[in-house]
Image (cartoon, rainbow, N blue to C red):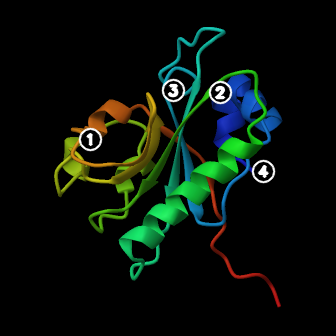
Amino acid sequence: MNFEPSFASSLPTTHALLTASNLTLHPAVSRVVLHGSRGLAGGYRSNSDIDLSLLVDIPPDASPSDRERLLREVWDVTCAHWQAPVELDLAVVFDARGCGLTCFERARWDEAVCTIGSVDCFGLYKLHKGFMGLVTNAGVAVRRMYPCLTIWRRDRRLPDL
């Protein structure tokens, strides 16, 4: 996996962990964002999990059942291949309001970046305390996910012919 170049230099231990983890992504994943103590927040303990958000491109004409099936597939692909000594805290995130999820491109929170509101403004699929599925109206505040760092993005360029 080709991580963003700045990832290895800014977080060498987390980079090494993820390089060895067999991080595997579904083709619908467009970006991987790192949060929490193993990211820019720092201060992780040896038993700390690793917090990753997989940002997914969902076809605009997808039915709710197709959307949920795709999100589950994304979750399953990554979790089935995970091979690391630390637990993975995974969230599958999608653009629910047409904003492009630009808030995930920034390392630090800036109120001015979010023009549509910053609570429950993106779609979220997660496993948490026995619940697996779409998380709706949970009061998820964007500012709580910071600091974050994009560590991988799908290359959107067309292949050379």
Check disc 2 and report the residue beneath it: 11
Task: Name the residue at 79% across, 37% down.
Answer: 19
In the rendered image, which residue does mark 1 sit on? 110
**Number of numbered discs present?**
4
> Which residue position is annotated with label 3?
40
User: Which comes sooner in the sequence, label 3 or label 2?
Assistant: 2
- Tags 3 and 2 touching, CB below 8 Å: yes
Residue corresponding to mark 4: 1
Q: Nearer the viewer, mark 1 or mark 4?
A: 4
At 78% from the left edge and 29% from the top edge, which residue is drawn? Answer: 16
| Mark 4 surroundings: few (<14), some (14-19) or many (≥20) residues within 10 A | few
Mark earlier in primary sequence (4, 2): 4
Query: What distance separates the C-alpha of mark 3 from that of mark 2?
Result: 8 Å
Q: Where is residue 129, by image quadrant? A: top left
Which one is nearer the viewer's eye here, 45 or 11? 45
- Residue 61 position in % (x across, y down): 39, 83
Residue reaching furthest to the bottom = 161
Q: Is residue 34 above or below residue 125?
A: above
Given the image, on which type of amino acid does mark 3 rest? Leu
Is residue 23 something that shows in the picture? no
Amino acid on which disc 4 is placed? Met
Mark 3–mark 4 Cα distance, whole angstroms, equals 20 Å
> Which SS class for mark 2?
loop
Secondary structure found at label 3: loop
Measure how far apart labels 2 and 1 are at the Cα level. 23 Å
